[in-house]
Image: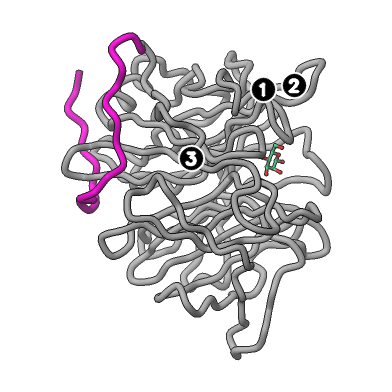
Amino acid sequence: MNNIEIIGSRVANMPWQEKPSDIKVPVWRYSENPITKRNPVEGVARIFNSAVIAYKDAFIGVFRAETINGRPHLSMGKSTNGIKWDIDPTPIEFVDEMGQSFNPKYAYDPRLIKVEDTYYIIWCTDFYGASLGIAKTEDFKTFVRIENPMIPFNRNGVLFPRKINDKFMLLTRPSDSSHTPFGDIFLSESPDMTYWGRHRHVMSRGGDGWWQSVKIGGGPAPIETSEGWLMLYHGVTGTCNGLVYSMGAAILDIDEPSKVKYRCKNFILTPEEWYEERGFVNNVVFPCATIHDAETGRIAIYYGAADTYVGLAFTDVNTLVNYIKDHDEIVEDDHEIGIM
Ligand code: BMA
């Protein structure tokens, strides 16, 4: 087993639970899952598919809050331990770059990523159909929306946590206007967070891993490791009872992240517990964030469960990266740079 390191910061009060001795898989669930319950705050029926980040010796989150009229918005939350969250029931107020109100009609599946000294929120928004919204904040008080980065239809926008070759890097999943019965992961780059181009294909759905046969989409911000970018994502299969969402993992090249170095043929988490199998949408595991500690290699994964709850799972960088390498199976031309 190779010794793999996370390249990044130390997180002193990392949420963590040791791997139970009877678990043989590389990712294990928090014993007190789910960490959000139904009707978590006034006017909100469910919180799921949400993003968290370490901030000033504590944690901050942007939560997908499904209101009691069924329309999702984004709410801020705070936590001292990454497990028990104090969530604001009111939506985040966004302004445009001139300071005028610029609020989305709906907002879901946020990611929250720090690049240099700025925190970016990326979510699925309405722009004549599902597309990506993006906003920046430095203090979690003022949230400035940058104009629509992509044309419709697109979902699952995930920023890399640092520039690569002096460019911001964004994973996306081009979609359709509905529940999208297809979908691969693509990469776009930008010099300034406004203009995105040099689009490349990163990863295909399918392969022998039937759990990802219908579509795949980015998850948490990729984690920089000594082996490459550790990317968690969701993969979807179709059954006679509808879609099933699982979590997968791959390693991308550190300087050319449209090249997949290793891709795990097995899912690393799939709906098995009651809160993943049963909810507003059954059988959904949908990762959106990690908190990870460079000193210990520990990784806490936050995932939406059954479009109803937030679940927490754990792994460590050595266990997971070595598992990916041991079960590597590249799909189609994923090793390529992805220009054509
Ligand atoms: C996707 C998104 C996610 C959701 C998933 C399962 O298309 O809408 O927010 O978790 O479907 O319903």
Magenta segment's dominant SS is loop
Which residue is denoted by mark 2 in the rendering?
Answer: 238
The segment highlighted magenta reads 1-23
Task: Tell me which amino acid carries mark 2.
Answer: Gly
Residue that appears at 27% across and 35% down? 227
Asked if residue 197 can be seen in this view, the reply is yes
Name the N-terminal-most of marks 1 and 2. Answer: 1
Mark 2 closeness class: few <14, some 14–19, many ≥20 residues within 10 Å: some
Which quadrant holds residue 212?
A: top right
Residue that appears at 32% across and 37% down? 299
Task: Tell me which amino acid carries mark 3.
Answer: Ile
Mark 3 closeness class: few <14, some 14–19, many ≥20 residues within 10 Å: some
Residue that appears at 23% across and 37% down? 297
Whether tag 3 and tag 1 are in contact, CB under 8 A, the answer is: no
Which residue is denoted by mark 3 in the rendering?
Answer: 35
**In what element is the residue under mark 3?**
loop
For residue 213, the mark is: 1
Disc number lying in front (1 or 2)? 2
Disc number lying in front (2 or 3)? 3
Mark-to-mark CA distance, 2 and 3 = 28 Å
Q: Front-most of 252 and 297? A: 297
303 within the magenta span? no
Task: Tell me which amino acid carries mark 1.
Answer: Ser
Whether tag 1 and tag 2 are in contact, CB under 8 A, the answer is: yes
Q: Position of residue 41 (x, y in %)?
A: 61, 55
Mark-to-mark CA distance, 1 and 2 = 8 Å
Q: Position of residue 251 (x, y in %)?
A: 39, 34
Q: How many marks?
A: 3
Asked if residue 202 can be seen in this view, the reply is no
Where is 132 relative to 277, above or below? below
